Amino acid sequence: MRDLIKRILKEEVGVPSGIADSAKRLYLDLITRLKRKTITGNSNFNLLFKNKDGKYSFSDFKNFENIKIEFEFEGYDIAENPSHSGVLIMGMGHQGEAQLNDLFDLVNVTNNTTTLSITLAIPTSIPEITNKDIIKTLMDNQVMIVSSLAHELKHAYDGYKKPTEKLKNRASYSAYSSVRTGIHEVDEFIYFLATAEDTISTYEDGEVLGSIIGKMKSDTFEIIDTQIISNTQKFEGITLYENNDKEIHFLLCEDNDTEILESKIYNK
């Protein structure tokens, strides 16, 4: 599973030099600008950062004039989401433009402004947030924000280095990378199943020796926990069922190694 995710989310042209430093400078300037920003209601707003003297340039990605960060807000009801409180980070993105050519390839549109976005979730009980609320959320999550800024700048760099892309490749990446649930345990961790079988073949089934459920960090793929859930059953499917501030429940399905296209569903 780890290899599959890495293959699908692979970076096409490697990690460009200097991108981490550029992301850190952008983050610090973002905090400084927000301190001077007056927020009106919970309306979306943009901040523009000029790439003067190549302040945010890295590697050979230098020919852009500005970085624009779009702040977008969505409301959520704390009563319906008791495990959450305060202003939450829902996601970040790179707003690149592309057009389809006659071969159905995506052709990136060159723009002097690199546009990034930050989406925040605000409790509906807060009629109007302040710049201090946003700053606190960004500073409480500094490591994640800087890392995400670098990740989104990398997408801009990829578009510069690789101006065309197959549509199916973009769709495959989006399916694995664009969805955030707002549930910390699901967004920050990957849960997986693994089964051991008594066979030397990578194809033929063998006697089931047991199944485990595991948990790894989504950014580093570091496995931080595993539990044996059966010594005799072969579990191969997992999906989120429900969660609260103390527990998270999954539905599991079993592969019975027969031609019968049916499976029992278990609540873990």
Image (spheres, rainbow, N blue to C red):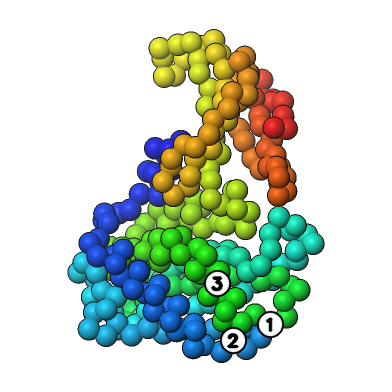
**The residue under label 3 is which amino acid type?**
Lys
Residue 194: percent from the left, percent from the top? 52, 27
**The residue under label 1 is which amino acid type?**
Glu
Residue 76, quarter of picture: bottom right
Q: Which numbered marker is on residue 136?
A: 3
* Residue drawn 74% across the image and 73% down it: 124
Residue 3: percent from the left, percent from the top? 39, 37
Does residue 102 appear to the left or right of 87 in the view shown? left
Q: Is residue 134 above or below residue 207?
A: below
Q: Which numbered marker is on residue 128?
A: 1
* Residue drawn 40% across the image and 49% down it: 9
Q: Which residue is more in the foreground, 60 or 56? A: 56
**The residue under label 2 is which amino acid type?**
Ile
| Res 101 visible | no
Q: Which residue is more in the foreground, 237 or 50? A: 50
Residue 257: percent from the left, percent from the top? 59, 17
Q: Is residue 61 above or below residue 242?
A: below
Secondary structure type for disc 1: loop
In the rendered structure, are the residues bearing label 2 and label 1 in contact, judged by CB atoms less than 8 Å apart? yes
Q: Residue furthest toward the right?
A: 79
Does residue 65 appear to the left or right of 266 in the view shown? left
Residue designated by label 2:
39
Q: Is residue 57 above or below residue 33?
A: above
Work out how far the residue at label 2 is from the one at label 1, CA to CA, in angstroms: 8 Å
Residue 84, quarter of picture: bottom right
* Residue drawn 41% across the image and 46% down it: 220
* Residue drawn 66% across the image and 20% down it: 260
Does residue 74 appear to the left or right of 105 in the view shown? right
Which of the two labelled residues, at mark 2 and mark 3, occupies the earlier sequence position? Answer: 2
